[in-house]
């Protein structure tokens, strides 16, 4: 396909695709999926080889959130049956992190529910970072605490945080459909604060919330413009008790197309498969490793993931290798510049300072049951419908690890 040849050439040059080209990737047929994966895989291997970076989530404070994000099991007034607990002590968080690091993770993501941290909360997290780095000096620590206020990003950087996550989640045009208690601009502002403080920006999206192809392309292009070092791609986990619990719009092939589009738009950025890969990619997870160079190990914030052992076996069986603690994730031109994916041929930055959403967010949801029925109608072409059967059997609330007395799944 001429389209794929063009996108590979642009990816190897770090050149921005056109919107039309990005949309065309999402519109490819199931017959072309393997060709799309192979093409995007060439770009992934050029910048990242066959390395897979492992990340591990520690949910420092679960539930009890005042925000109304429709996809989130921790949202205001939710009745999802998730674990609810207040701040873990530094030593508890350090023990939780150690399980992931023992499994091969090189980055620990410290996440706390809520609109944003108080200054006292930032000090709590600073103490947790110190406790983790005292035991594991080389570990990367990413904080994900919500919207940041003046000076908080700088304080986290001083405490030893390496990165800050805040996802854009969806396009600016549709952001108000999923959240009303804060704005898209609030999220962008937080990523910019993190970036300005010298933290590595981590910002991504959630796919499967009923958005259009145009919305997906909009948010990924916004991320490219903001220049994050890592882009987590979450696939909505429809958790019972959330407003999006009936939203099952994703098939494994659709997820592969989305990951390929992200790789083509941000070719030399760490693309991470985050929440929902087990639910929506299922047996095609190994193919996704040809597109993304980073995954979360084990469980997510409030839902269970694939076992850590299964993750490691999948990586090895697919012919990839776990990235070592002594290896630099980003290509030399990005790491030498202290992050940022550099300028393309047109002088445009490749990533994004974007904010919002948890670091490995549990994605959950269903915007409107009637909409799902509509896309299942006989008169809608399969490629347009892209709806898969609901797999509620794959959605399980986390009952182990951080905040419990049970061993974590790492």
Image (cartoon, rainbow, N blue to C red):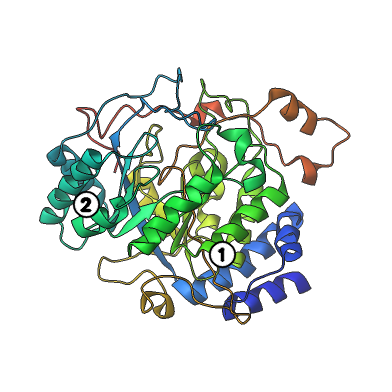
Task: Give the mark nearest the N terminus, 1 or 2.
Answer: 2
The vertical placement of 38 against 232, above or below, is below
Label 1 secondary element: helix
Q: What's the residue at 26%, 34% (across, down)?
A: 401
**Residue furthest right in the image:** 379
Left or right of 360: which side holds 161? Answer: left
On the image, which quarter does residue 376 sit in? top right
| Residue 400 visible in the snapshot | yes
* 235 vs 113, nearest the viewer: 113
The one of 141 and 32 positioned closer to us in this rendering: 141
Disc 1 versus disc 2: nearer the observer = 1
Q: Quadrant of the C terminus?
A: top left
Spatial CA distance of label 1 from label 2 is: 36 Å
Residue under pointer 1: 225
Q: Residue furthest front?
A: 150
166 sits to left or right of 117: right
Residue 141 appears left or right of 300: left
**Mark 1 nearby-residue class (10 Å; few <14, some 14–19, many ≥20):** some
Q: Secondary structure at mark 2?
A: helix
Q: In front: 380, or 87?
A: 87
Q: Is residue 5 above or below residue 272?
A: below
Instruction: Classify the position of the N terminus by image quarter.
Output: bottom right
Position of residue 161 measured from the top left corner of the image (x, y, whole percent): 26, 56
Residue 102 disc label: 2
């Amino acid at each position: 396909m001429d389209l794929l040849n063009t996108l590979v050439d642009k990816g190897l040059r770090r050149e921005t695709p056109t919107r039309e080209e990005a949309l065309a990737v999402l519109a490819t047929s199931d017959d072309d999926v393997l060709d799309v994966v192979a093409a995007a895989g060439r770009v992934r291997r050029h910048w990242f080889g066959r390395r897979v970076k492992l990340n591990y989530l520690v949910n420092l404070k679960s539930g009890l959130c005042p925000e109304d994000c429709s996809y989130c099991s921790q949202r205001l007034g939710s009745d999802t049956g998730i674990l609810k607990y207040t701040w873990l002590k530094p030593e508890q968080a350090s023990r939780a992190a150690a399980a992931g690091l023992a499994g091969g993770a090189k980055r620990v993501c410290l996440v706390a529910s809520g609109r944003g941290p108080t200054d006292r909360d930032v000090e709590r997290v600073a103490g947790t970072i110190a406790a983790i780095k005292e035991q594991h000096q080389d570990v990367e620590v990413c904080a994900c605490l919500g919207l940041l206020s003046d000076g908080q990003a700088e304080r986290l950087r001083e405490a030893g945080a390496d990165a800050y996550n805040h996802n854009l989640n969806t396009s600016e045009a549709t952001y108000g459909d999923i959240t009303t208690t804060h704005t898209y601009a609030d999220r962008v502002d937080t990523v910019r604060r993190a970036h300005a403080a010298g933290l590595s920006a981590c910002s991504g999206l959630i796919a499967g919330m009923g958005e259009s192809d145009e919305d997906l392309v909009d948010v990924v292009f916004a991320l490219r413009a903001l220049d994050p070092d890592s882009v987590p791609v979450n696939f909505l986990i429809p958790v019972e008790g959330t407003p999006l619990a009936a939203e099952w719009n994703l098939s494994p092939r659709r997820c592969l197309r989305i990951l390929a589009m992200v790789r083509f738009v941000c070719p030399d950025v760490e693309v991470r498969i985050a929440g929902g890969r087990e639910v929506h990619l299922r047996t095609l997870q190994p193919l996704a490793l040809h597109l993304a160079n980073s995954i979360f190990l084990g469980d997510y914030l409030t839902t269970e993931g694939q076992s850590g052992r299964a993750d490691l076996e999948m990586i090895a069986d697919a012919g990839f290798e776990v990235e070592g603690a002594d290896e630099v994730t980003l290509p030399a031109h990005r790491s030498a510049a202290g992050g940022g994916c550099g300028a393309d041929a047109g002088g445009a930055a490749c990533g994004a300072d974007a904010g919002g959403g948890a670091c490995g967010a549990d994605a959950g949801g269903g915007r409107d049951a009637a909409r799902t029925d509509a896309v299942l109608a006989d008169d809608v072409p399969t490629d347009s419908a892209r709806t898969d059967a609901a797999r509620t059997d794959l959605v399980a609330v986390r009952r182990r690890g951080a905040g419990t007395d049970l061993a974590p799944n790492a």
